Image (cartoon, coloured by chain):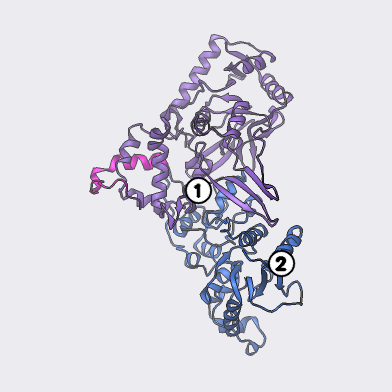
């Protein structure tokens, strides 16, 4: 353990700021966090900064510019323990949809003066550029998981963050399965837990914002979605949201035959 | 002595249980399924509802009768009321004098489990072997189990995924209840045959208006039982599990692993899957820590993780472990099957994997598949 209070820095790359806001959203616990850790660099909260190096860095966002490719290396150099927060930082985010298209063409469609832009062809996760010590999933991250990661760091232990499916959380909450009982397409069986099965609790299908669960069987999942009548295009769209560039969701096998259900 | 009550009598039983300070948990319609949850009166039973279940499929369906128990079994099991998904085991606080240890009070709110099918009664008996073992009794489970007032309900409407007759756990309860109800609805006559299985059950029944059962009543109940046995949607031959267990390296395991999502739904809804993990957590307040027991699943990597990684690293090995434990090695461990034939794992599987079909295929296909004899039966893949 460290005698002085450990220092914390929060960094933003290509992102919407929602994950950083989750730290501010801790409200009730924020003072307790500040008592245990020096918030040394957090521009979202205050312009007062303390120079690095830092004990812990929370990194939000993906790498989309040549400048950011260099900046993340400097952040890594300044950080003893680097935690990426959110779908952008862990898989490239919604902006990684550009990876499937032609960036020049997209720039012409979206911007009046594309020549002002300086951007890479791809949006990539932080782990493609520097070693990452822990990845916190979600779009946005879950505040309880954030507090767990910070608490675990302070205690020098492994965070209790399972990599299993959303279904396990969903059943623990005594929810009705929206897929089995309502026929609603739901990515819960292949999606990383952590949200507490938020969407199925409100009778919506999981849209996979925490990215792939461990050993996500996307092929069989696509077959089950096809069985519900979801078209190949729609299956691809379901997987191609906030974690589209994750290895497992990148190329869902959308032309698979629906599985045969053996009924007597 | 079997007694007979009408619908008002059944409602009166719910009222008396609540008046005695019990939370009544019963099958009730919620979010498009029938689940065991708290009810405030007999009017909240699934009156006029049944369901259509199959692999990965569950839909409510209306009946044109006022029956209370025209469905097979609730979509979720009753285990959460005896073995909750999350249980606080201990809370500790460092002080100058040492460590303060706070143990939670094992007593729980008093409940009545009302309308428990025979398969689910058998499942509670299975859980008893796990949690009431002399060498390691779980105090919370023991307190909840001893206190729970159980009203069983014979099943006259088995579903497409049911096979309690194969597992010899139903459809009619014969032990392990305070009261047992058999609903009869014929020729416009609606009545409930009630047997008591304990003193507290008999005492409660004595407070309800009832008449003795006639020979015609008991004959109708016996006919409903026979009819239910004939209408099980699935079967499982008792000789198949040991035959299947002889083929631990069969390619069928690869086939099922291709379909299996490893999502854990089967283990969550199984009324006998009891596995949990123990999670220690420290919060932001220095010196304070908690230990929780949380439902876990043998389909997760964490479940079999030891130093260096998980013992069962593939979905193939996890499905095989789950199926063969449930149907085969459970006998070695607890002297009974871990499967009671409720069929929930079939319905709850998003891709409709059917354990009865898997076991039958493995049992039948051994020699003709051309697989090498299994000489390394301790191999873990």
Comparing labels 2 and 1, the label whose residue is closer to the camera: 2
Percent coordinates x, y for residue B365 in the rendering: 28, 43
Q: CA distance from mark 2 to mark 1?
A: 32 Å
Where A117 sits versus B257, above or below?
below
**Quarter of the image containing the C terminus of chain A?**
top left
Give the colour in which the image draws chain B: purple
Q: Looking at the rendered structure, which numbered label has been put on residue A21? A: 2
**Quarter of the image containing the N terminus of chain A?**
bottom right
Percent coordinates x, y for residue A121 in the rendering: 54, 81
Q: Nearer the viewer, residue A132 or B239?
A: A132
Q: Which residues are magenta?
A: B355-378
Q: Is residue B368 magenta?
A: yes
Under circle 1, the secondary element is loop
Residue drawn at point x = 59 percent, y = 84 percent: A119
- Give the chain coloured blue: A
Percent coordinates x, y for residue A107 in the rendering: 61, 83
Quarter assignment of residue B366: top left
Quarter assignment of residue A143: bottom right
Residue beneath label 1, please?
A: B264
């Amino acid at each position: 353990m460290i005698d002085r209070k450990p220092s914390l820095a929060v960094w933003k790359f290509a992102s919407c700021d929602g994950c950083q806001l989750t730290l501010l959203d801790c409200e009730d616990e924020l003072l307790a966090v500040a008592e245990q850790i020096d918030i040394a660099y957090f521009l979202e909260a205050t312009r007062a900064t303390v120079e690095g190096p830092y004990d812990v860095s929370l990194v939000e966002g993906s790498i989309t510019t040549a400048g950011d490719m260099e900046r993340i290396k400097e952040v890594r150099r300044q950080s003893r323990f680097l935690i990426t927060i959110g779908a952008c930082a862990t898989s490239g985010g919604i902006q990684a949809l550009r990876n499937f298209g032609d960036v020049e063409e997209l720039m012409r469609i979206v911007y009046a003066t594309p020549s002002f832009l300086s951007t890479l062809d791809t949006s990539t996760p932080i782990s493609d550029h520097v070693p990452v010590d822990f990845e916190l999933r979600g779009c946005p991250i879950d505040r309880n998981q954030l507090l767990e990661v910070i608490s675990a760091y302070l205690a020098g232990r492994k965070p209790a963050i399972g990599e299993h499916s959303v279904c396990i959380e969903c059943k623990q909450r005594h929810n009705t399965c929206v897929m089995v009982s309502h026929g609603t397409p739901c990515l819960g069986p292949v999606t990383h837990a952590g949200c507490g099965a938020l969407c199925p609790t409100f009778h919506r299908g999981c849209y996979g914002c925490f990215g792939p669960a461990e050993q996500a069987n996307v092929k069989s999942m696509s077959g089950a979605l096809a069985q519900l009548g979801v078209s190949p295009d729609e299956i691809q769209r379901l997987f191609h949201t906030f974690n589209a560039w994750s290895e497992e969701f990148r190329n869902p096998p959308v032309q698979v035959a629906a599985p045969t259900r053996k009924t007597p | 002595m079997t007694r007979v009550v009408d619908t008002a009598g059944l409602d009166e039983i719910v009222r008396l249980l609540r008046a005695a300070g019990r939370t009544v948990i019963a099958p009730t319609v919620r979010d498009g399924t029938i689940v065991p949850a708290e009810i405030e009166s007999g009017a909240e039973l699934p009156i006029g509802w049944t369901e259509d279940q199959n692999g990965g499929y569950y839909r409510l369906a209306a009946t044109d009768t006022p029956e209370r128990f025209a469905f097979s079994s609730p979509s979720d099991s009753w285990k959460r009321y005896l073995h909750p998904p999350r249980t606080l085991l201990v809370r500790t606080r460092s002080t100058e004098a040492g460590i303060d240890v706070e143990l939670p009070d094992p007593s729980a709110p008093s409940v009545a489990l009302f309308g428990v099918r025979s398969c689910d009664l058998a499942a509670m008996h299975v859980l008893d072997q796990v949690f009431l073992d002399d060498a390691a009794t779980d105090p919370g489970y023991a307190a909840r189990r001893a206190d729970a007032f159980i009203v069983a309900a014979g099943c006259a409407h088995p579903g497409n995924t049911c096979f309690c007759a194969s597992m010899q756990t139903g459809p009619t309860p014969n032990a392990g209840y305070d009261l047992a109800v058999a609903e009869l609805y014929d020729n416009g006559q609606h009545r409930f045959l009630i047997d008591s299985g304990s003193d507290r059950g008999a005492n409660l029944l004595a407070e309800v208006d009832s008449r003795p059962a006639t020979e015609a009543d008991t004959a109708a109940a016996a006919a409903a039982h026979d009819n239910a046995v004939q209408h099980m949607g699935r079967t499982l031959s008792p000789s198949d599990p040991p035959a299947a267990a002889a083929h631990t390296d069969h390619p069928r395991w690869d086939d099922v692993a291709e379909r299996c999502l490893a999502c854990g739904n089967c283990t969550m809804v199984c009324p006998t899957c009891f596995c949990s993990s123990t999670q220690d957590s420290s919060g932001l307040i220095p010196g304070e820590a908690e230990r929780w027991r949380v439902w876990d699943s043998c389909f997760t990597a964490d479940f079999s993780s030891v130093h260096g990684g998980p013992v069962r690293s593939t979905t193939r090995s996890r499905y095989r472990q789950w199926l063969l434990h449930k149907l085969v090695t459970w006998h070695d461990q607890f002297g009974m099957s871990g499967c009671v034939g409720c069929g929930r794992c079939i319905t709850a599987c998003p891709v409709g994997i059917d354990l009865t079909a898997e076991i039958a295929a493995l049992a039948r296909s051994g020699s003709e598949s051309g697989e090498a004899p299994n000489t390394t039966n301790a191999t873990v893949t």
